[in-house]
Image (cartoon, rainbow, N blue to C red):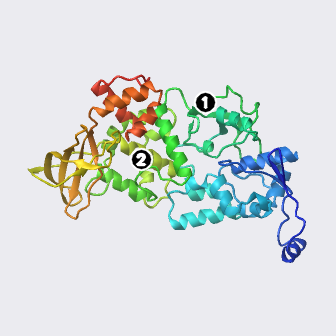
Amino acid sequence: MTVVNGLLFILYPWQPQLMQTALMSGALPAKLAVFPEPYPGELLHSMMARYRFYTGQSHCTVSDELFGQSHRSNPVDLPFRLADLALRLPRRVGLDGDMLLDRHTLFPYYSAFLDAEYLSEARVAALGSSGLVGNRVGKGIKPIPPIKFLRFCRKCLQDAREKGRDPHWLRAHQLPIMTFCTIHDEPLRNSNCRVSTSMRLDVPSSRSCPADAPLVLPKHAAWDLLKRLSLDAVSLLEGTYPFDIGSDGHMGLRTAFAEKGLVRTGGDLDWPSIADSTADLIDGLAPAFPAIRALSRKEGGWLAYALNPKRRTSTDAVLLAGLLLEGICPRPVSVVVTTSTQGPWRCENPLAAHHGEAIVTEVVRTEKVYHRGKGEFRHLRCACGYEYSIVTREDGSSTKPFRLRFGPSLARFILETSLAGVPFWKAAKTAKSDPASLKRIIAEEGIPHHWDIA
């Protein structure tokens, strides 16, 4: 094997007799003599584009060589016939159809919340010849439209050149919800390579990706919120669920809204209250995703769709709903005062060195409540000044701790991180707070800082 300009040149001096017979009879396709070495996180479309670039062939000829059939179209993000492609790849590439699908397409992101039946259908469609993979995974459901041009990060292309690699398209950058490169904390830009239905295979270049290419997001959007969504999207693409609902999209979201007190007795969501409590977050995201303003079923909204168990779960909608949920404060419940002497409890202050240690003994107040069963509400205060509440039910289960006050540790943290040049959205993530809530706390408590978050 010889590697030249990122290409694998492979010669096979012998093959097992059975393989030779299969090749001679046409039962198995011949292996490609050359194919680009895949880069981590590279889009499969990019690998095929580099193959066309180095072989100098036409788009249709490349399609015929790679798939055994000339394609007029094969989606950039969710291609199909991957099993046919894998049979033709040189053995040294070390990728089968499933590995191509999971490592070099956007399939893991769009299928993250599918049930087993839908997931199986989508995977079979991607490996086979039926196509329409996007329809099977719920891609294109509101509120985020598909991308029109391939996207890139200037620093990522520069890094590739400095490392002696071919410039290439990264798959994470082609997610419509992604507006920032999470590696370099830089806004993504639109290339001149249009995402069309035709089978066009173009590599990044100074002409297709100029340094002054337009940004993918408008100036007036809340960049801190969009950075957070980009981080969550990358985590999900790599197989890590960014918040607590796990892979249970529909029911996980509905349960989370119920815990916030936003599900009525009949099971319907309290849409006016949801709209009111998420208004600031919606206003920050709407310049980038205008359709996000329509929430309820009456409006044909995306959130009602995301919460409908009869529909296929949209990954974009789940991430947006998770972001909105973090900005919603739970409603107060009717209480009767009582006392409690149990403890100690864990300190939930993410900024404290003793975070997670069972050292909290001060109970500000306790109350009997009814929260999905009889339970006891406790308002707790740690010696570090952090205050939170928790409800313990009769069966021993508890709600998630709800922060009431950070205490003095927040002012120190804000001043130190802002002076150090840490981006505001990263500081909010460290504090386990959504950016909008942290911004409000800073304003209410008059905490000095060096960020431009006015």
Q: Residues within 10 Å of mark 2 (few under 14, many from 20)?
A: many
Residue labelled with disc 2: 322
Choose between 407 and 148: the one closer to the eye.
407
Circles 2 and 1: CB distance less than 8 Å?
no
The vertical placement of 25 against 434, above or below, is below
In the displayed structure image, the side of residue 128 where residue 145 appears, left or right: left
Q: Which element carries disc 1, helix, strand or loop?
A: loop
Image quadrant for the C terminus?
Answer: top left
Q: Position of residue 125 (x, y in %)?
A: 65, 63
- Amino acid, disc 1: Leu
Residue at image position (23%, 42%) is: 382
In the displayed structure image, the side of residue 281 where residue 336 appears, left or right: left
Residue at image position (52%, 48%) is: 235
The vertical placement of 132 against 155, above or below, is below
Image quadrant for the N terminus?
Answer: bottom right
* Disc assigned to residue 297: none
Q: Position of residue 279 (x, y in %)?
A: 37, 36
Judge whether residue 5 can be spotted in this image.
yes
Q: Which element carries disc 2, helix, strand or loop?
A: helix
Q: Residues within 10 Å of mark 1 (few under 14, many from 20)?
A: some
Label 2 vs label 1: CA separation? 25 Å
- Amino acid, disc 2: Gly
Q: Position of residue 192 (x, y in %)?
A: 72, 34
| Tag count | 2
Residue labelled with disc 1: 215
Choose between 394 and 370: the one closer to the eye.
394
Judge whether residue 199 can be spotted in this image.
no
The vertical placement of 143 against 96, above or below, is above
In the displayed structure image, the side of residue 388 where residue 294 appears, left or right: right
